[in-house]
Image: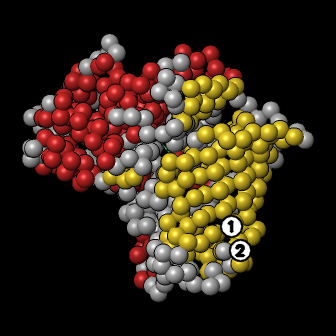
Amino acid sequence: VRPTTVLRREALTAAVPVALAALLAAAGPATAGTGGAPGVGDPYFPLAGNGGYHVDHYGLTLRYDPTSRHLDGAAVLTARATQDLTRFDLDFKGLKVTGLTVDHDRAQYRRDGQELVVTPRRPLHKDEEFRVAVTYSGIPEQVTDPDGSADGWIRTDDGAFVAGEPQGAMTWFPANNHPKDKSSYDITVTVPEGRTAVANGALVGQRTAHGQSTFHWRQIEPMAAYLATATIGKFKVEQYTTRDGIRVYNAVDPREASRAAPVLKKLPSVLEWESRLFGPYPFRNAGSIVDHAPNVGYALETQSRPLYDSAPDLSTLVHESAHQWFGDSVSLTSWKDIWLNEGFATYAEWLYSEQHGGDSAQKTFDGLYRHPASDHLWAFPPGDPGSGKNIFDTPVYERGAMALHELRTAVGDRTFFGILRAWAAEHRDGHGTTAQFVRLAERKSGKDLNHLFTTWLYSPGKPNEA
Ligand code: ARG
Ligand code: ZN
């Protein structure tokens, strides 16, 4: 296993606490009546997201002081009820709520772990649009994921590395925190002059006054909450437009600049190459945030602008860029399907190598099949990692990529790349499930692929040689 992969996952031993949350989420009374459910029903993260409404747009206005680590926030959510609601939840952890209104009326709320339970003055009707405004403040705290890694608002020596996969969005804004719910965003961040705040999408405004700089970002294409960022640091900034008309904004910590430069220079050609393979790049904006966050240990495909904890190598840039199609534009409906993100992004690395003078994908496959770095590669099947603890582990990435390679071998290159392009096109700005991918592959190839996918995605242990 190459070091790039090691960077993104962690060999962790933290025991999974039994999902008490699962029991709570499943318990009847909490979801009865016209209250919105406290989760969307994700088996791995039962309290992630909320039932009863969809958020169309988040307007987040933040002020952060890296010295005191104090964050002041105002979030305005424009939402639509999908059922009658006397009460609904937001996911929000830590920070103190200082005010909350629904449609400009002060609403009652209480905190219950990561649930912010809101009771509007007047019940909401199915299909009604409503506006929730929350003000909050305090010192944001990162969350520890089931695998022991950290996500959310992660403090750095000059700002914050802000990454939310899978749970961390709720550490800095109240959210419907599950990829099932995608929204557009305006993210406005004020920081002391000399720092830069980088979020998703287009930079639509920037000003400095009285020693404070404000950056206003707008993400138009729908985005899952975990892909939002507001990373802050002392960055060097570079902006340009690619031949395809994509606006690029790169922000780089000067300590990483010399190692990052040769890799970032390749971003336009990587995006062009991926566009040829996967179909048009799904967003108007692109770029990179190269932070200096030695305690993080991974990169994240934050939408339109991947976030790196240090200068990435080319393979990692290829990986996070491929996620813009697979994971960001086409989102998960359940964390269990994580191979649709990680297996695809890993396979993009193999393809890049194959088409740029490195090992063929077959050779990478064979190497893993014959001499895996450890038996851990076969520890669980990628289509059913078992729990949130395993979603970023080697079998999801490497065996997930192996499953795609098996598909390619079975259907041939022409059909295989047609399947990838159809997947990105048919689910663009939307969602996909493993079952839908299997059906698409069968439709495009005219083959019964049940055995192949059952073997590579769902069967425990090392699959037999075909
Ligand atoms: N999706 C990221 C990648 O593979 C990994 C995110 C890991 N997140 C975490 N909390 N460990 O590029
Ligand atoms: Zn990935």
The image position of residue 155, as x and y in percent, is 68, 43
Q: How dense is the environment of label 1, judged by Cα within 10 Å: few (below 14), some, or many (20 and up)?
A: many
Please determine whether, in this image, residue 446 is positioned above or below residue 350. Answer: below
Farthest residue to the top: give it: 357
> Is ligand 1 closer than 8 angstroms to the Cβ of mark 2?
no
Q: Nearer the viewer, mark 1 or mark 2?
A: 2
Q: How many marks?
A: 2
Label 2 element class = loop
* Residue kind at label 1, given as amino acid type: Ala
The image position of residue 293, as x and y in percent, is 63, 34
> Is ligand 1 closer than 8 angstroms to the Cβ of mark 1?
no
Which residue occupies 62% across, 85% down? 122
Which residue occupies 70% across, 44% down? 216
The one nearer the camera, 205 or 133, is: 205
Q: Do we see residue 390 in this rendering?
A: no
* Residue kind at label 2, given as amino acid type: His
Q: Which residue is mark 1?
A: 133
Q: How dense is the environment of label 2, judged by Cα within 10 Å: few (below 14), some, or many (20 and up)?
A: few
The image position of residue 236, as x and y in percent, is 70, 25
The image position of residue 8, as x and y in percent, is 46, 35
Label 1 element class = strand
Q: Do we see residue 302 in this rendering?
A: yes
The one nearer the camera, 34 or 274, is: 274
Which residue occupies 59% across, 52% down? 185
Please determine whether, in this image, residue 196 is positioned above or below residue 222. Answer: above
Q: Which residue is mark 2?
A: 104
Which residue occupies 49% across, 23% down? 243
Circle 1/circle 2 CB separation < 8 Å: yes
Using residue 33 as the reference point, say whether residue 440 is left or right of it: left
State which quarter of the image contains the C terminus.
top left
State which quarter of the image contains the N terminus.
top left
